Image (cartoon, grey):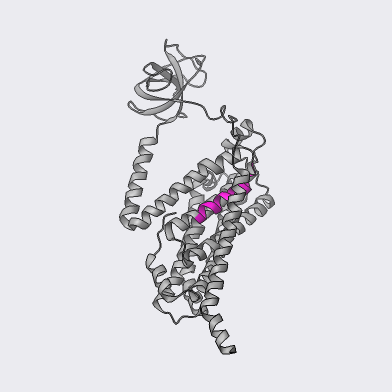
Amino acid sequence: MLRLSRRCFNAPISRLSLLGAARAFIVVVALGTVVAMALMWPTNVGEKFSEVVQPSDKATVTGIDDRPCGATVSDRCVRVLIHVDSGSDDGSRGVIQWNANGVDPPVHVGDKLRVARAEEVPGYEQVGQNTYQLVDFQRGPALILLFVIFAVLVLLLSRLRGALSLLGLGVSLVLILVYIIPAILDGEPPVAVAISGSLAIGLITILLAHGRGPKSIAAMLGTSASLLLTALLAVIFTSATRLTGLAGEEAFALRLADPSVSLQGLLIAGMIIGALGVLDDVTVSQSSTVFALRAANPELGFRELFRRAMDVGRDHVAATVNTLVLAYAGSSLPVLLIFASGALGAGDALNLELVSEQVVATLVGSIGLIAAVPSTTALAALLALHTPHAEVEREAAHGHAHVH
């Protein structure tokens, strides 16, 4: 009787209890995320940033005129002649005036701009036309073309799985634009908003791209745990290094528009969201590796599954950490150029908040990534051992798409 009860426990009951517990935990995490998002959902964003984000109209450059002027900064002035293509001045002609000192961006005839009405600048020749200021270039068409190329390549390579991954990417962007950013603007705590939004993004993208089987369950658990660890480390070391979030020019604009926004909280939120992309990638990869090993050799036990999957995980960590370092180094390249020029010593350069922000973000994200590999591998090995072999083979056959 005792042997019979042990056999019953070791087969279906243990499988059901472990998989059921894992699924139940994910349900709890998902429900907690939904409740947190509901409590912090933006309801009164208002127009706090209307003075910072300047409204603009479309315009096309029709001519460029470089001539002497009476400005104090430079004895040469550039007049950019434009045709306004939208807004209340649609169809009219105007001019943008600036000094020929190399500070303003170069423009050419035919360039598409975003412009706003401006007051006449003292010292410049009055031209009898509306004067505008350059807000930015129109980048929409080029960005759309780039995204189309990206989407086509994803679909050609991954087909249905790629389509689901693109859908997950769309959901991620919607959550960022509809929940995370408006909630922060509405005065909610940036760190709490980033954690709840990132958990929602991670769970949804994994579910869409990889289904709801045990492989995805392990990846969801690993992503959630590692994301919370990353958030904790970001909070601790942002405070320990006295990062204020005031290093960038946009910080002053945000502080001017709404003094109640926590710039340090925004900095931490950026670290959390930035780490999410590599976390869900490495957790899905590790879970897929475990199930592929188990499908290829059903005799492998927990220890051997873990060891072999960790061999792959170590390579993945090394490559992904390098990706993180290069990504953050690229974002602070102007400061690194100052350091390389010899104007600053190594200690002084690292002490700059612009550099320290990138160092903390890189190391915090890397630690979360390193922790995700063994934890996800162990969870996936446990679930693989307690999953019927036919289902393991189905999970392994689904593969792993690298778009999140």
Q: Is residue 230 visible?
A: yes
Compared across the picture, whether 197 is left or right of 96 comes to right
Compared across the picture, whether 65 is left or right of 365 comes to left
The quarter of the rendered structure image containing the N terminus is bottom right
Write the start and end of the magenta stretch as one range.
188-203
Q: Is residue 337 visible?
A: no
Rendered view: 298 above or below 239: below
Q: Residue furthest front?
A: 1
User: Looking at this view, is 167 or 273 the one in front?
Assistant: 167
User: Looking at this view, is 113 or 355 the one in front?
Assistant: 113
Residue 232 percent across, percent down from the top left? 64, 56
Rendered view: 218 above or below 254: below
Residue 9 percent across, percent down from the top left? 56, 80
Residue at x 41%, y 50% (from the top left corner)? 167
Residue at x 44%, y 51% (from the top left corner)? 168
The majority secondary structure of the magenta stretch comes to helix
Q: Is residue 190 magenta?
A: yes
Residue at x 49%, y 26% (from the top left corner)? 55
Residue 207 percent across, percent down from the top left? 47, 58
Q: Is residue 80 magenta?
A: no
Number of residue marks: 0
Residue 392 percent across, percent down from the top left? 43, 72
Residue at x 57%, y 64% (from the top left corner)? 24
The quarter of the rendered structure image containing the C terminus is bottom left
User: Looking at this view, is 265 or 245 the one in front?
Assistant: 265
> Which corner quadrant of the image does residue 61 belong to?
top left
